[in-house]
Amino acid sequence: MWLYIVLGLIALALYVFKSCKYDYWEKKGIPIASGNEWFFGHFRPLILVKKHMNEVIDDIYKEFPNAPMVGYYVMGVPGLMVKDLDMIKTILVSEFSSFNSNGFEIDKNADRLASAHPFVLKGDEWKSARAQVTPSLSLVKLKGYLPSVLKVGDEMVKYVKNNCIGATEVDVQDLARMYGTDVIGSAIYGIENNTFENGDSLVSYITREIRFERDVSDNILLFFQRCPVIRSFYPARFSSKKLQDVVVTVTRKVIQERIASGEKRNDLIQLLLIQKESDTQGVFTDEYMSAQVFTIIGDLYDSASNFITIILAVLSRHPVIQEKLRSEIKEVKSRNNGIFSVEDIEGAKYLEMVFNETFRLFSFFIPRQCNNDCTIPVPGSKPITITKGTQIAIPACSIHKDPKYYPDPEKFDPERFTEEEVAKRPKFTYMPFGEGPKKCIGNRIVTLHIKAAIIKILDNFKLTPSSKTKYPFEIDPRHTFTIRPKGDVWVTFEPIQ
Ligand code: HEM
């Protein structure tokens, strides 16, 4: 045992020593962010869970305000932050074939669910996985899902009303998670959970296991997994064995019940069963269908709960914006006898502006990896050759807060997203869902899901700040790859008579 550990450590030390290239950017004449430390490179605060990924990205972004790109290192590996908007377009769109992956890898045997997610796949596997998930997110499907999403919204309102005595403080993170669990239950599995009445629903077994928190050892392992020896001991995975088993068991159970009853529903399972009927090659196994389900659940549950939490907290601090939004919701509602269609929700202009402004302030960066040596133009300078294997960071989160594009960037101001204001800004200054052929395919379903919750809440409650939550809130550094406020988020709800 000890012999293996010692040999593993020697292999690791040799690997780190061999792969550390700390003068790589100097030799190319690219400016380097300060704070480069041996072993960690620029990412020590991230790896040690002291800062969120966005803060680390922002520190690098701000250091050379006029540079089109800045070099950095992550544990000896060179990375390039590309800040110039034309270069960003080249990488994400025009030269996509040379930057068509993001460097994340998940081992198929260690994680049979997350390894099928288009985000981590490459080449033909990526193309076909993306094509297979896309039909479940079409407009027709969204129209089918919406009534059950709105019904869950009504249950959420009933739950809050039953628990509100006048103005009452509500933990909105908790509320959003219950809502997310039930939306997944109905839109994906066709199960009416009512988590608001019974916290122990079938789908809550899954959502309880979806965890994006990472600790120091997870972060270190993530970087060491580039080393083949370490990968053979610790294959890269996202979901725990327990989460994988629960998703496969629940999916299998729902499929068997659906086939036995012959019932037809407007959910993802039904769509997969229809596709299975014409599957002559035996692709649609229970595990395959579970992976399809997981691609949507994994993203939808956590991201939507976080954004619902953030928007409710932000609206509670901005009473004028909240009131203007409520008036629009009431107007759309009265125009349609109280029934909201996908078109009504997507067509509500102020709601869209409030969303865009929230996504502007709470976005992530876009990762890419160079898969062929590629020479790209640099404005005002000679072209640069980016070599195979270089990690690329497109700092969408920092561009969204750059005063050059968004004056007074920390101010929450939906008016930045009127058609006239959007037309004034250059392209690639707003990318919360990425850009180019790898752009997020879940933007429509997730926005609909979040908007339905906000509509139901604002239609029924006035929101004011709670003294229990400090604002602006901090982003939890343990959530390296998602944006979640640190700690509970409380908002005061007052029923509107
Ligand atoms: C607030 C919620 C969400 C945000 C902010 C978000 C953002 C993003 C971003 C920035 C990317 C990377 C794009 C790129 O590399 O250019 C991405 C990829 C992706 N997202 Fe989302 N996403 C969200 C929710 C969802 C949901 C709910 C789903 C599924 C239903 C989803 C499915 C995907 C998929 C499949 C990819 C990989 C696309 C590819 O590599 O081809 N996302 N998302």
Image: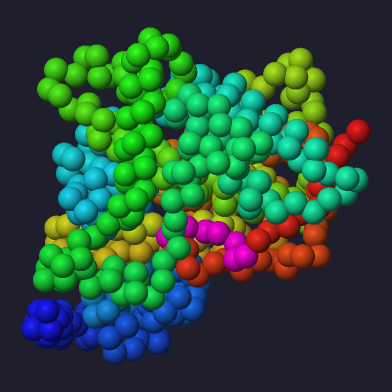
Residue 486 forms part of the magenta stretch: yes
In terms of depth relative to the viewer, which is nearer, 186 or 75?
Answer: 186
Q: Principal SS element in the magenta part?
A: loop
Q: In this view, does 56 lie to the left or right of 127?
A: right
Give the vertical position of 491 relative to 473 (above or below): above
Q: Residue at x 34, y 74 (%)?
A: 217
Give the vertical position of 32 relative to 269 (above or below): below
Q: Give the range drawn in magenta.
A: 481-487
> For the view shown, which residue lies furthest in the bottom direction?
38
Determine which quarter of the picture holds residue 387. Answer: bottom left
Determine the quadrant in which ligand 1 lies.
Answer: top left
Task: Give x and y (percent) for residue 348.
Answer: 67, 31
Task: Give x and y (percent) for residue 9.
Answer: 15, 83
Give the quarter of the figure containing the C terminus: top right
Q: Is residue 189 left or right of residue 9?
A: right
Q: Which residue is drawn at 75% across and 51% down?
A: 170
Q: Which residue is drawn at 83% across and 44% down?
A: 164
Q: In this view, does 434 lie to the left or right of 341?
A: left
Give the vertical position of 341 relative to 348 (above or below): above
In terms of depth relative to the viewer, which is nearer, 175 or 126?
Answer: 175
